[in-house]
Image (spheres, rainbow, N blue to C red):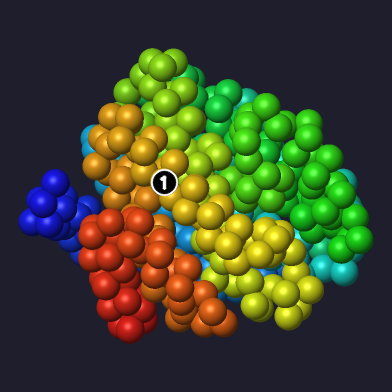
Amino acid sequence: MNLLSERVKSRTVIVPYLFRILPAVERELAIWRNRALVIPHPELKRQALDSIDKKRFHCQGGSIYALYPGAKTAQIIGFVVALQTISDYLDNLCDRTEATNEGAFRRLHYALNAAIDLDAPLADWYAGYPYNQDGGYLTLLVQECREKIAVFPGYNHIRQELSHLVSLYSDLQVYKHQDRGLRTELLTRWFSRHAELAPNVLWWEFSAAAGSTLGIFVLAASASIASFSRLEIDRLQACYFPWLSGLHILLDYFIDIDEDLRHDELNFVSFYPDEKAMTAGLARFLRESLQRAETLPHAAFHRTVVQGLLALYLSDPKAFCSGRNKISQQLLREGGREARLLHKVCLGLRSAGIV
């Protein structure tokens, strides 16, 4: 593949993403921000607004799946923004409280399951949590997700996989927000119960993969087109879990490692024994993601997602601090020329304050 053809393929995603998708995401976020402004409880309001204002790039990144070939663009944007907003809001609620009540955290995350399971009951999400007066904010987000996926022709074919991914995600969030002295043991025991899902990866790599919402988004985008075969679902899963999803969250932790260690926060990348092992681990997830993307329908799209993840995270100034410069440069080289092109685009977007 020559450089010209790579640029053409990148632009078929970049141009509509910049000029069509991102503005639509901003409009959706503005709607949810206005709803967050009227949350009665001041702390819940603060965390809802904070999750939108400081983590909007999660919705911006996930919205790339609105450009999945043939997908229902508006519905996918609505689903991605609502589900990711739930995820970021719940993460804040678990992060910002002194309590480490496993039952309360698990109850909060029932909202995520209800968002993707049309048969799940709407419940008191805040049972056991110190605050509960959100004015129906979380339930509105859940209902928005359900309204979007209910009309996807392939929804019934992916229900089991969606529930499985949400279950893993919820387990991770519950365990990683427990007391510092317990969370590593809880996560390693949890991994041992699920190790067959991702042979030959380490417990922190498995945890990283479980922490990504990309597998949910790609299944939803595929289901918005039509029903599809068991083989297609299995191939998507084999690419995204643990590889592409793991790459996503490992890169996220990679750029935040200094800040997390400074605040004694859990950071999965810090569990690599040294810089050499860290580099090898990240590079392995990148190679596996790229290779498996080539086996999928619409391989160019999935390849662009992988290279876009590199570009987005490694365009953060933190990627080139504290000796990470060498690792970042190696990953961009392994990502190929298209990744380096996208990296320049992301640098420009950051300079403009768009991401």
Looking at the figure, which quarter contains the C terminus? bottom left
Where's residue 238, x and y in %?
Answer: 48, 30
Of helix, strand and loop, which one carries label 1? helix
Regarding residue 7, the answer to whether it shows in the image is: yes
Residue type at mark 1? Arg
Where's residue 169, x and y in %?
Answer: 66, 44
Q: Residue at x 42, y 39 (%)?
A: 218
Where's residue 289, x and y in %?
Answer: 42, 43
Regarding residue 18, the answer to whether it shows in the image is: no
Task: Please tell me which residue lies in front, 233 or 225.
Answer: 233
Q: Which residue is mark 1?
A: 287
- From the viewer's perspective, is residue 325 above or below residue 307? below
Q: How many C-alpha atoms fall within 10 Å of the one at disc 1: few (<14), some, or many (≥20)?
A: some
Where's residue 99, x and y in %?
Answer: 89, 63
Q: Left or right: 230 with respect to 270?
A: left
Q: Residue at x 59, y 45 (%)?
A: 209
Looking at the image, the residue that sits furthest to the front is 276
Q: Residue at x 68, y 36 (%)?
A: 167
Looking at the image, the residue that sits furthest to the left is 4
Q: Left or right: 200 with respect to 185?
A: left
Count of number-bearing discs: 1
Task: Please tell me which residue lies in front, 294 or 210.
Answer: 294
Q: Residue at x 35, y 50 (%)?
A: 305
